[in-house]
Amino acid sequence: MKIDFANLQKQHQLYKEEIEVAVLDVMHQCNFIMGEPIKTLEANLQNFTGAKHAITCSSGTDALLLAMMALDIEPGDEIITTPFTFIATAETIAFLKAKPVFVDIDEKTYNIDPTKIEAKITNKTKAIMPVSLYGQPTDMDAIQTIADKHNLKVIIDGAQSFGSTYKGQTDSNLGDISTTSFFPAKPLGCYGDGGAVFTNDEALADKMRSLRVHGQSKRYHHQYIGMGGRLDTIQAAVLNVKLKYYAKDFKRREEVAVKYTQALQDKTLTLPTVAENTTSVWAQYSIRVKNRDTVQLKLKEKGIPTAVHYPMPLHLQECFGYLGYHKGDFPISEIVSKEIMSLPMNPYLTDDEIAYICHYL
């Protein structure tokens, strides 16, 4: 048996006819930049998330940049975040010449540990950037309480978690600004790069709309230093189709995760945990094993792909050497990075495929 990790081909075949009609319509209209499907998608995203403002952009990475630019993050400012995440989280902070300040993770959820945040706050701290890792939000009540106490902003890196909920609210409707990614392998993915920012603050929304088109207030009048951060109209057309079926796909992901957990509960593995009052969209189904290389090789020989998200915490990456962190500074992140392993996760895994994967673990 050969198993597909994300099975994007299966999804394409399911929605192929609608997507091709939508894409061809964009081509016939020849309005490739900021065409009508962009407005439609933003309205659809607002309806889906409950956020007052959804602003599409060119990627999840650019979504983070837009959020920080809107909040006037400047060189020397500090933003508290997690070292156990994709590099874009901290990379964008560094790109703006601000300083990523890392806080270790919770060993069960792998999200930032709120109990360790306050100790890292200084007079240079401007924001907290929690990551909704693997598809589930972090403990936002605890983080928002800290942010309010110290007059800090909260930017949610929700690149992996679009549609997840915390106490009944989508994580696109939390914090000052929430971001997401529509990278093809994400739970809601387009056919290239794409992303969005969400906020309930009208002034921030207006500013981010301007920032994504080079800071324009009107054509060739530039209020801010901005960026070329627009989402292509073709990608918006794809997402408008896929968003219609997203709730169904998310439900299937949830069912796959439950079946994995039931099949693996008697194995000597650490299984993923979803916190109380939280739902995950299961961007990954990540387990922990002590002998990861051996397990991965065994599965590969049986046609079962795996992935490691992430093998080295950011504080140990060469590009962040200037921050002065050392091995041992964030022990939970370091332990998890040596043991974490993601199994195939997509809405189309069959019972036979799940049983086959679990048999060899």
Image (cartoon, helix red, strand yellow):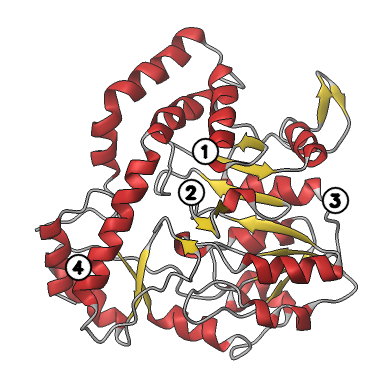
Residue 4 in the figure: left or right of residue 83? left
Which element carries disc 1, helix, strand or loop? Answer: helix
The type of residue carrying mark 3 is Asp
Whole-angstrom CA distance, mark 4 to mark 3, is 47 Å
Disc 1 crowd, CA 10 A, few/some/many (<14, 14-19, 20+): some
Question: Height in image: 312 above or below 79?
Answer: below
Place of residue 167 in the rendered image (x, y in percent of width and height, measured from the top left): 55, 60
- The residue labelled by disc 1 is 48
The type of residue carrying mark 1 is Phe
Q: In this view of the protein, can residue 244 be seen by the observer?
A: yes
- The residue labelled by disc 2 is 163
Q: Residue at x 45, y 63 (%)?
A: 134
Which element carries disc 2, helix, strand or loop? Answer: loop
Of circles 4 and 3, which is in front? 3
Contact, mark 4 vs mark 3 (Cβ under 8 Å): no
Of circles 3 and 2, which is in front? 2
Place of residue 98 in the rendered image (x, y in percent of width and height, measured from the top left): 79, 62
Q: Residue at x 57, y 67 (%)?
A: 138
The type of residue carrying mark 4 is Lys
Disc 4 crowd, CA 10 A, few/some/many (<14, 14-19, 20+): some
